Amino acid sequence: MESPPPVLNQTFVVILNRFLLILVMKNKFRLHPKVIIIISFFMGIVMIASAYFELSESKKEIYRLFDREAASLIETIRLSSINTLHASDEIENLLTDRLLDNARFIRHLDSSGRLTEKDLAAYAKMNSLFRINILNAEGIRVLSNGVPTPGYFRKGESSSRRPKEINELLSGKTDQVVVGLRESRIAGEQRFAVALARANKKGAIIINLDAASLLEFRKNIGIGKIVQDIASNPGIVYIVLQDSVGIVAASKGVTKINSVIEDELLQQALTIDKPFTREFTFKGNKVYEVIQQLSYEGENIGIFRIGLAMDEIRNLETRMVRRVVILFFLLAAISIIVLSIVFTMQNLKSVSTELSKFKTFTGTVLGNMGEAVIVVDKDFIVSLFNKQAEKLFHTSSEEVLNRHLKFFAKELFEELEKLIFQGAANVIEFSTELLQSDKTKYLSVTASQSDDQGGSTTLVIKDLTEARLLEEQKKRNEKLSAMGELASGVAHEIRNPINAIGMIAQRLGREFTPTEGSAEYHDITKVLKTEVERINKIITQFLNYAKPIELQIQKINSGEFFNELSLLFSEQAKQRSIHFDVTAATEFEMKVDPELMKQTLLNLLQNAFDATPENGSVKLNYYKKDSNILIIISDDGKGISEENLSKIFNLYFTTKKEGNGLGLSIAQKIIDQHHGTIHVTSKLNHGTTFTLNIPNNEKL
């Protein structure tokens, strides 16, 4: 829940205190009968609206559940059908391979020229082959495994019903063909045939077998069988597989159903591979229909339509309506009883009871406010300590209730006591600081004193630490920006004169030689030239600092990035006997400019190593918090004085003899370009801690 703004909190406390005072003055709290009638009417409207909403949501939930079950069912049928098609194709491929292997063996025997019809008959019987025919190059049958059936072309004849694929084989266009399933001359029978070219392309070898077992297998495991088996389950009215032409397969009793052409939703389902649901009228009854496309190996076979009986939904809706109606009347009866009790007992309610209720209400509201709320009596003993206060002061309410305020907030107590002693107004606003072990928190406090005999004071406390840090960084950035602009302007103004002085110094040293003191003259021109170069270098640094930084955001692995930093400093740590520790909770993806971020961390780590004595320690801890990256670099070195702490990010400020005062200024600028913050805490002779908080996103 979003916390109310501080002004509303203060207003609420003042109004509530005044209301409690009015109750005390009136001595009793009564409800007028008209008010009770209005409340009853309002409660009735609320209950009706609640019942309607509950019924509507329950109905939606039932349909959502039905959608999930229907989608699961049609997906099961779809996958079973695809698996069936896979199995059928696999069986047909195995059968093809077997017949082709038989044909190759016969071709081998045929090439010797000693193959007879008796041999073919024996081989066909052994391998369960129905017919083996050997044709010459003209397509004339020259050899067969048995006596031909009536109407079949005889030895020495050519067939007019020969498959066209065989002609391609005889003409030499291909070496083998798979004829597949083909109707036999014997009515009602099917054959599965393959053909192979004879050796030296002298004709063709045709082998077929009776496809009855293959067709029976297809029938037993085919899509039609799946449809019939699943449709026999209770609750399923029909299952239909249809395409744009008509019904491909259907459950029992389904001979006619609306076509794809005349139904817009079916046309849509035929082209989009996702389940569709609707209520549909089938044979005069409402069913819940789920529709999904069936495709196999890129070919659209059709759509599955499953009609589910809606009896269960109707029964559930009826039971739900009955429960809601019963609940409504039950609540209405309870409401009437409660309101009657309130009406008859209200004159017995004393001000103390009402005051107690409102105190409880106040405590509940204040305990759940977004700001820290503390209530103390006139002796500063704590009577209320909400959850936000627990977070702010890092202690639980059990530890501070009925204890003195200074026990956990000494600074707050001293400031409050001083203001109250000075006779401040009933509502006091002031700022203070809270010193904790890890950092200092900046607080905004509104204290509201009550006029009752208890003399309680309510403290509404807002933590301004984050806002203060952001404000300080903003001021620091503005200061650095102004310094950079000033540096850039000054650098541009003095660079040309300095370059002119340098050129004059070079010419004086090269073209002029005095008659006396030439050595001293050349030393002076050399020093002049050196100093000009040094000034030019400083000007270049000014200009580089003033130049805007362009980030190159990349996605990098945190472990690899920080391991590389660890390797860069491991040797230095070893040589100086400094304990260097890099820790992380887990690896994660970072979205930063890796080169600029490395430059920043190298500078901070080097500063930490420079400040740390032998046998000291430097720690680098990094982790991801929400959508931010937190990097903490700490050392136990000499620390930074309070005077210098506010200057460390200033341009050209340094305490090192060899330092140039640009490192931390540039680091601050890089972190600012990442829309992050850099915070430093330090204590002399105890060490320094830098905390970097950087948004982990590419939108910079």
Image (tube, helix red, strand yellow):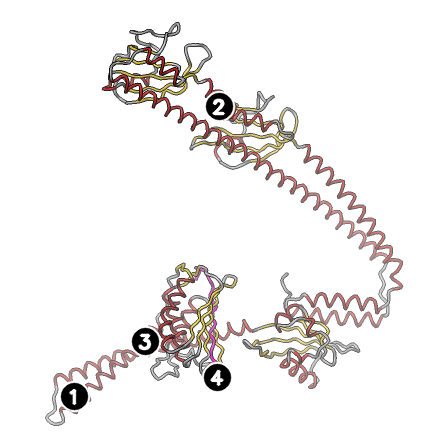
Q: Residue furthest bottom?
A: 516
Query: Which quadrant of the view contains residue 281?
Result: top right
Mark 4–mark 1 CB contact (< 8 Å):
no
Q: Is residue 652 visible?
A: yes
Q: Earlier in the sequence, mark 4 or mark 3?
A: 3
List the residue tagged with mark 1.
Answer: 522
Determine crowd level at label 3: few under 14, some 14-19, many 20+ residues with C-alpha closer than 10 A: some
Query: In the image, 540: left or right of 243?
Result: left
**Residue where numbered disc 4 is placed:** 684
**Which contiguous range is marked in magenta?**
686-700
Q: In the shown orientation, is residue 4 left or right of residue 571?
A: right
Based on the picture, tell me whether residue 411 belongs to the magenta stretch.
no
Side (left or right) of 119 relative to 48: left
Q: Alpha carbon of mark 4 to alpha carbon of mark 3: how far?
A: 31 Å
Where residue 86 appears, as percent x and y from the top left, is: 45, 30
At numbered mark 1, what does the secondary structure look like: helix, strand or loop?
Answer: helix
For the point 33% across and 82% down, which residue is it? 658
Tell me the amino acid under the disc marked 2.
Arg
Q: Residue at x 30, y 75 (%)?
A: 540
Residue 218 is labelled as 2
Quarter that holds the N terminus: bottom right
